[in-house]
Amino acid sequence: QVQLVESGGGLVQAGGSLRLSCVVSGGIFSLNGMAWYRQAPGKQRESVAHINQDGGTNYADSVKGRFTISRDNAKRTVYLQMNSLKSEDTAVYYCNFGALVNSPSPYWGQGTQVTVSS
């Protein structure tokens, strides 16, 4: 059974930084792509970043140059470093196990709230 637990969200001022973490239990972490998605109030869930099993990455245009996704296979953890945060980054952030680029799997974490104050 695959379980994902996100952490690291919080309240930050515009221009600040946060690092999200997602620990995965179950499944073969090192052989699967991982992704971060976000959902703002009243909006659909959207892809933020993806990292494949070889470390190749993909980003939404809105976060390119500001966010960095990375993974530590030994710790079964995926990270999202978020810099130069903007108010429009405010959302619940979810990680997804086994994702393809812009194509999530059924395995989601519970989400972590990120709020950016302007």
Image (spheres, helix red, strand yellow):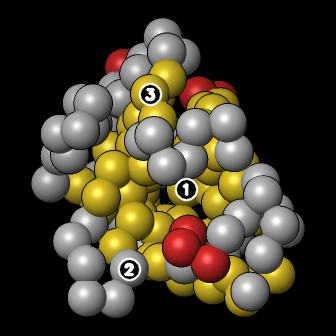
Specify the label residue 40 is tagged with. 2
In whole angstroms, how far apart are the C-alphas of marks 2 and 1?
Answer: 19 Å
Residue for badge 3: 58
Residue type of the residue flagged with mark 3? Asn
Side of 9 relative to 48 (left or right): right
Tell me what residue is drawn at x 26 percent, y 66 percent: 45
Q: Are dots 2 and 3 in contact, CB under 8 Å? A: no
Q: Position of residue 91 (x, y in %)?
A: 47, 78
Instruction: List the residue tagged with mark 1.
Output: 22
Residue at (78, 75) in percent of width and height = 14
Q: Position of residue 4 (x, y in %)?
A: 42, 60
Q: Secondary structure at mark 2?
A: loop
Q: Quadrant of residue 33?
A: top left
Q: Residue at the top extreme?
A: 54
- The residue that appears at 82% across and 81% down in the rendered structure is 13
Mark nearest the camera among 1 and 3 is 3
What's the residue type where badge 2 is placed? Ala
Q: CA distance from mark 2 to mark 3?
A: 21 Å
Q: Residues within 10 Å of mark 1 (few under 14, many from 20)?
A: many
Q: Secondary structure at mark 1?
A: strand
Crowdedness near tag 2: few (<14), some (14–19) or many (≥20) residues, C-alpha within 10 Å = some
Image quarter of the C terminus: bottom right
Q: Residues within 10 Å of mark 3 (few under 14, many from 20)?
A: some
Quadrant, the N terminus? bottom left
The x and y percentages for residue 77 are 59, 44
